[in-house]
Image (cartoon, rainbow, N blue to C red):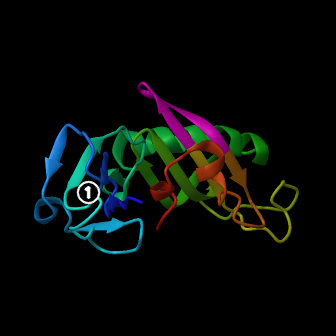
Amino acid sequence: MRSLCFLRLAVAVFVSCATVFAPIRATPAQTLSGMICENGNSVCRPGGNGEGSAVAFPIAVAVASASNCYTASGDDRAAILNVLRTPVAADLKIAVEFVVERARICGDWAFVIATPQPKGGGAMRWTGTVCAGDTSHLAGGLMRRNGATWRLVEYALCPSDVAWSDWPEKFNAPQALFDQ
């Protein structure tokens, strides 16, 4: 049985410790530091069964690592907040602006958590709105960029629980987008 090794960081390379044909071949010293093997070892042991070298197979990986995520600012921040503003204002039946807790972008995905307030500031009157009662008074929105345009994928207004906890799986959005 061959051991499979994976780079600890999210990269677009699959590494196997088996001796098989591959376009890239390196010695364990060149490639195995920073890898973890399927069998739990931090390195693949040289020795029998062709486990003396690492073989790398480039593959396409659709993973947004934390390194390509950033806090939304400028035009992107304004655009994603405007996308979220439309349904929130419609549900609350009032023009709103946001006190932003988090606005994060990872590749073509954006996630916002914010508290709506009346345009111009001031306290929101929750009585008589869909947010009346014991709720969070937060708005959470997941957006995806299509070309130059951000589009709303899903949003939650005044959830009583963490409504976006399943969004990474449900919409195949990067988990790093939701991490703090």
**Mark 1: amino acid:** Gly
For label 1, the SS is loop
Q: Nearer the viewer, residue 169 or 107?
A: 169
Residue ranking furthest to the top: 147
The answer to whether residue 95 is seen in the rendering is: no
Q: Circle 1 is placed at which residue position? A: 50
The answer to whether residue 51 is seen in the rendering is: yes
In the picture, measured across the screen, residue 38 lies left or right of residue 50, that is: right
**How many numbered circles does the render carry?**
1
Look at the image and say whether residue 147 sits in the magenta stretch. Answer: yes
Q: What stretch is highlighted in magenta?
A: 143-154
Q: Which residue is drawn at 61% across and 48% down?
A: 141
Image quarter in which the N terminus is found: bottom left
Q: Residue at x 22, y 67 (%)?
A: 47
Residue 41 image position (x, y, % from top left): 34, 75
Residue 115 image position (x, y, % from top left): 62, 60
